[in-house]
Image (tube, rainbow, N blue to C red):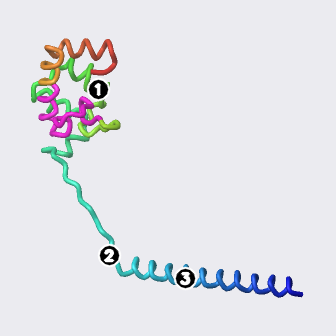
Amino acid sequence: MRKSILAFIATVSIGAASAETYTHTAHANDLTNEQQKSTPPTTQSIQTTTSSPESDNDVDAVYDRFMAAGGTEELWEKIVLPESGGNPHAKNGEYFGLAQTKLSWGYGTVEQQTRGMIEYAQSRYGSINAAVRFRTTHGWW
């Protein structure tokens, strides 16, 4: 009999604890729902640094801007197209831009990226031609 009473008390205690937990959970859900209703949605706008964003989506326009900024056909064909497909906003992991670089010029306009590529090719490889040869041989630059 004593075991039966203890079992009954344990069952009632567990049931009461479960009911109390359910009550607290339901109350917390009610608070969360009320907070969601009263909190206005937030928006975030992002600005880009390109001078003419509509032309950044057109590979021909990007090519024209690239060439006008001093780029070469060989640099475009052998480095830009394999690296980014001509997309100045291309991103692959930590690499960005036409040349897929970690350097700050990879985030600029097409013109800034082109000048950065030329300076990088000349400073690291000695010339654009040497940079292209390295890229062709190694698959990266």
Q: Do the residues labelled 1 and 2 touch (CB within 8 Å)?
A: no
Q: Which of marks 2 and 3 is nearer the N terminus?
A: 3
Q: Position of residue 86 (x, y in %)?
A: 26, 31
**Magenta-highlighted residues:** 95-117
Callout 3 secondary element: helix
> What is the three-letter code of the residue carrying label 2?
Pro
> What is the three-letter code of the residue carrying label 3?
His
Q: Where is residue 117 in the image (x, y as percent from the top left)?
A: 17, 26
Most extreme residue toward the front is 2
Q: What is the number of the mark on residue 81?
A: 1
CA gap between label 1 and label 2 equals: 44 Å
Q: Residue at x 19, y 45 (%)?
A: 53
- 10 shown above or below 119: below
Q: Mark 2 points at which residue?
A: 40
Residue 8 vs residue 73, the one in the foreground: 8
Q: Where is residue 3 in the image (x, y as percent from the top left)?
A: 85, 82
Q: What is the number of the mark on residue 59?
A: none
Q: Which residue is drawn at 14% across and 33% down?
A: 65
Dividing the image into 4 quarters, which one contains the C terminus? top left
Q: Mark 3 points at which residue?
A: 24
- 130 shown above or below 9: above
Residue 70 vs residue 118, the one in the foreground: 118
